[in-house]
Image (tube, rainbow, N blue to C red):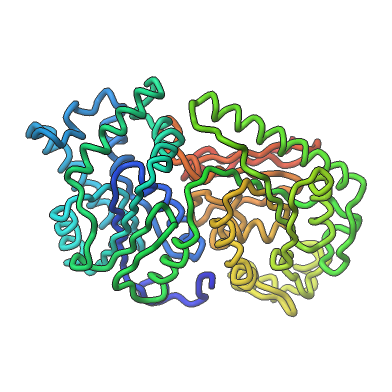
């Protein structure tokens, strides 16, 4: 289910306490991808969660690769004392930030994204946080398929600032050398070390040990659906209908709506072609193009917006569970009319827009509970995906607790809000990094314009507000 409507005295959910999920695994095993995916899901549940990556923090402290000591990743021969001191400082500072998130910022779950391949280092981390009342769980990512590892290196690591300006083949060879060096000193997690979740080949098989409680088991359930195949997810509002703002009418598209449907298909196809060309330019392994799957609700205006895709041979799936929120007695009313006719209900709605349920209506909490299975299907789907839906559904798939945020996979603050403009298409690629080292799936959004006069919303990076401009 989505987040409960109660709050414990500590402000944390399900009485689960503080949880530190420590990732374990050799480089290029998908640890960061798994961490970010789990963070998105937990945030969607309403759990205050944050990923702390030691690689990102090292880049923040030291800057580009030219500032990293030559023996920083060295394992075959002893490192210099200055390098060891630098590594200790970076690790200690990051762990201090983790404790600040728990103790000062009210966080509940932290995902500690690092290799953590040494039994001794894991023991120190477990004892340090365990002594402060934090429940430590190891999340180990194992992979024995070289094609998956190589694909991960090419699609993610080559775009890292560590390899800015490198020849692609030399960068791949260098990263493989780094993996082989660390493999000699790597030790897998054992049952004696405590609770763990082991993920083999990013979702092929999962092994768990001493996982207890509702929140921990939800994490396991979510991790059973993940994969690392590159794909792009698009969101589009349905086209304009003959009778707008009516839940009961279920009317067909207007002429402008049919025109939008045709332009939407052309824009999505053009964008997919451009993305494929961009990946080839960057030296990524393109392979065969991902099939495009289209999901719509069973409402006419949503399914008919997908008709151009049906006629072009694309698979379109109707999902009645993705129907828009039921407005109840507010159906067909403008904001001003709802305020005048139901002033008490409107006041209660403004006080708690997520949980309030108007007479004979659904609340956003009700809708989130209804849509949770779609979240798992989104994570499990390996095709490129276009979701043609209603504003309320897109809002809940994004993050219902920020109320009206814009992008799925977006890292929004608790108070950041934005509407989902009609006839617009947010696009997300839930993996990879940009040259600045930021995860691509967490800092930027793209809206393609299909018709004149629509809202354009652009999210630049986490923590920045959303800009809105009418074009």
Q: Is residue 89 left or right of residue 8?
A: left
What number of labels is visible? 0
Q: Is residue 177 above or below residue 218?
A: above
Q: Is residue 223 left or right of residue 384?
A: left
Query: Could you tell me which residue is drawn at 34 percent across and 58 percent down?
Result: 110
Q: Residue furthest bottom?
A: 360
Quadrant housing residue 342: bottom right
Query: Could you tell me which residue is drawn at 49 percent across and 40 percent down?
Result: 440
- Residue 93 in the image, given as x and y percentages of width and height: 21, 46
Q: Is residue 230 left or right of residue 31?
A: right
Residue 353 seen in the figure? no
Q: Is residue 109 above or below residue 28?
A: below
Quadrant housing residue 264: top right
Residue 198 seen in the figure? yes
- Residue 260 in the image, given as x and y percentages of width and height: 83, 43
The foreground one among 217 and 51 is 217
Query: Could you tell me which residue is drawn at 75 percent across and 68 percent down?
Result: 339
- Residue 355 in the image, given as x and y percentages of width and height: 59, 72
Query: Could you tell me which residue is drawn at 71 percent across and 48 percent down?
Result: 236
């Amino acid at each position: 289910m989505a987040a409960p409507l109660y709050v414990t005295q500590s402000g944390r959910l399900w009485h689960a306490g503080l949880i530190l999920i420590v990732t374990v695994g050799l480089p290029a095993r998908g640890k960061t991808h798994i961490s970010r995916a789990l963070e998105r899901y937990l945030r969607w549940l309403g759990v205050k969660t944050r990923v702390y990556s030691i690689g990102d923090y090292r880049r923040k402290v030291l800057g580009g690769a030219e500032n990293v000591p030559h023996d920083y990743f060295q394992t075959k021969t002893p490192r210099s004392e200055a390098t060891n001191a630098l590594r200790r400082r970076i690790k200690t500072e990051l762990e201090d930030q983790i404790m600040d998130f728990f103790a000062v910022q009210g966080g509940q779950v932290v995902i500690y994204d690092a290799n953590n391949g040494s039994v001794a280092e894991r023991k120190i981390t477990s004892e340090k946080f365990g002594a402060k009342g934090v429940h430590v769980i190891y999340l180990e990512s194992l992979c024995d398929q070289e094609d998956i590892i190589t694909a991960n290196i090419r699609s993610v690591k080559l775009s890292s600032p560590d390899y800015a300006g490198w020849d692609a083949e030399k960068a791949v060879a260098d990263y493989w050398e780094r993996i082989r060096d660390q493999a000699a000193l790597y030790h897998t997690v054992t049952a004696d070390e405590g609770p763990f979740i082991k993920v083999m080949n990013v979702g092929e098989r999962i092994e768990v040990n001493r996982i207890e409680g509702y929140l921990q088991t939800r994490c396991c359930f979510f991790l059973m659906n993940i994969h690392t195949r590159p794909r792009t997810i698009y969101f589009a509002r349905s086209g304009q209908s003959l009778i707008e703002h009516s839940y009961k009418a279920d009317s067909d598209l207007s002429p402008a709506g049919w025109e939008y449907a045709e332009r939407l298909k052309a824009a999505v196809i053009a964008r997919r072609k451009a993305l494929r060309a961009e990946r080839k330019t960057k030296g990524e392994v393109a392979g065969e193009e991902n099939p495009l799957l289209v999901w719509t609700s069973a409402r006419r205006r949503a399914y008919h917006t997908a008709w151009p895709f049906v006629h072009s041979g694309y698979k379109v799936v109707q999902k009645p569970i993705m129907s828009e929120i039921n407005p109840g007695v507010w159906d067909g009313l403008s904001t001003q009319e709802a305020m005048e006719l139901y002033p008490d209900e409107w006041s209660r709605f403004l006080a708690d827009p997520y949980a309030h349920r108007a007479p004979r209506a659904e609340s956003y909490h009700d809708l989130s509970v209804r849509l949770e299975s779609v979240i798992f299907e989104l994570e499990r789907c390996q095709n490129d995906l276009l979701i043609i839906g209603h504003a309320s559904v897109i809002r809940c798939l994004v993050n219902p607790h920020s109320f009206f945020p814009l992008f799925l996979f977006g890292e929004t603050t608790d108070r950041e809000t934005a509407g989902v403009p009609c006839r617009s298409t947010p696009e997300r690629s839930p993996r990879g990094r940009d040259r600045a080292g930021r995860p691509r799936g967490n800092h930027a959004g793209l809206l393609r314009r299909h018709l004149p006069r629509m809202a354009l919303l652009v999210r630049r990076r986490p923590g920045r507000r959303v800009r809105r401009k009418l074009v």
